[in-house]
Image (tube, grey):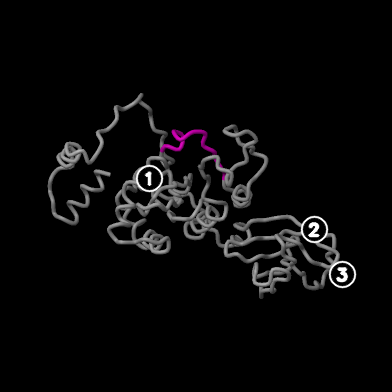
Amino acid sequence: NVQHFHEKLQAEHGVELSYTWVKQALQGAGLVARGRKRGAHRKRRERRPLPGMLLHIDGSRHQWFQDERWYDLIVILDDATSEIYYAQLVEEESTATVMAGLREVIERKGVFCALYSDRGSHFWLTPKVGGKVDYHRRTQVGRALQELGVQMIPAYSPQARGRSERNFGTWQGRLPQELRLRRLGSLEAANRFLREDYIAQFNRRFQVPSRQRGHAFVPCRSRDLERIFSLQFERSVNRDNTVSFQNLSLQIERVRWRATLAGCQVVVHQHLDGTLSLTHGPHCLGRYDGGEHPCRPKLLQR
């Protein structure tokens, strides 16, 4: 990334050569490829006028540490300003890692109006590969956002995700160099750097003002985000008041409002921290450690 290289020359080495001179010198030395001829003219979609009206979420698989390891970078940014609200490296983009990012943004900023994403299986169900999404069948992420009143918008081509695609081009050109300069080689260290330092740097460089003052975020004080952003599975209670789930037998303690729960439909919540809980309507029937005792997990305090 020539722009990034030029910025480092100025900031850290005091070199005052122009960007054009540096770029031509690098191209002349064969260190940077000359740009391709531009294609047909396209007009960019106009940004939303207020922050919080539309957020983009996407993942980019890349060799971020410039070695043989591949990781996904999950980024959530605002359409109105290009402000990065969340950026973390993960082993693989998944339902759980996407939920973790969305929950963090909502806890910090509030509930937003709409989310723009690709048609990955953790966002949408598509009856035919590459076809249209099924708006009536929800994924775990779709169900969580529906509970919060957030509209989901699918993208049908990389060009449709132009803002996030261009954003990832910038990330891929800059972040590996920043990690190398700081000798950061682990996920934990890289994510700490992203959270504590680099996201703010990135926003100072690339964030733009919104067209209107204010924002469209709604505070989320009374929402049960731990329950909403959990993987949820319906199960029937066995005759001995246990629930079978992934080779576990979750024992339900006696409740005051019913003699037995045998035969009742309950929901198993698999939380992002690895714990489990059971609910029946508004009632929490128990919380479990999720694996310390595989056959009869220990009941945790509510």
Q: Which residue is mark 3?
A: 259
Q: CA distance from mark 1 to mark 2?
A: 50 Å
Q: Of the residues under marks 1 and 3, which one precedes in the sequence?
A: 1
Q: Position of residue 15 (x, y in %)?
A: 13, 51
Element at label 2: strand
Q: Please identify the quarter of the rendering in which residue 42 is found.
A: top left
Q: CA distance from mark 1 to mark 3?
A: 58 Å
Above or below, 232 against 284 in this view is above
Query: Could you tell me which residue is drawn at 46 percent across and 35 percent down?
Result: 158
User: Which residue corresponds to mark 2?
Assistant: 236
Is disc 3 placed on a helix, strand or loop?
loop
Mark 1 element type: loop
> Which range is magenta?
151-162
User: Separation of disc 2 and disc 3 at Cα?
Assistant: 16 Å
The answer to if 158 sits in the magenta stretch is yes
Which residue is identified by label 1?
Answer: 210
* Front: mark 1 or 2: 2
Q: Tag 3: Cα neighbours inside 10 Å, few (<14), some, or many (≥20)?
A: few
Instruction: Decide which of 170, 203 is in the foreground and name it.
Output: 170
Which amino acid, mark 1? Answer: Ser
On screen, residue 197 above or below 70: below
Q: Quadrant of residue 162?
A: top left
Three-letter amino acid code of the residue under disc 3: Ala
Precedes in sequence: disc 2 or disc 3: 2
**Marks 1, 3: nearer the viewer:** 3
Q: How many marks?
A: 3
In the image, 245: left or right of 56?
right
Residue at image point 44% right, 33% down:
159
Q: Is residue 97 left or right of residue 49?
A: right
Residue depth check, mark 2 versus mark 3: number of the one nearer the observer = 2
Percent across and percent down for residue 228 are 62, 57
* Magenta-colored stretch includes residue 133: no
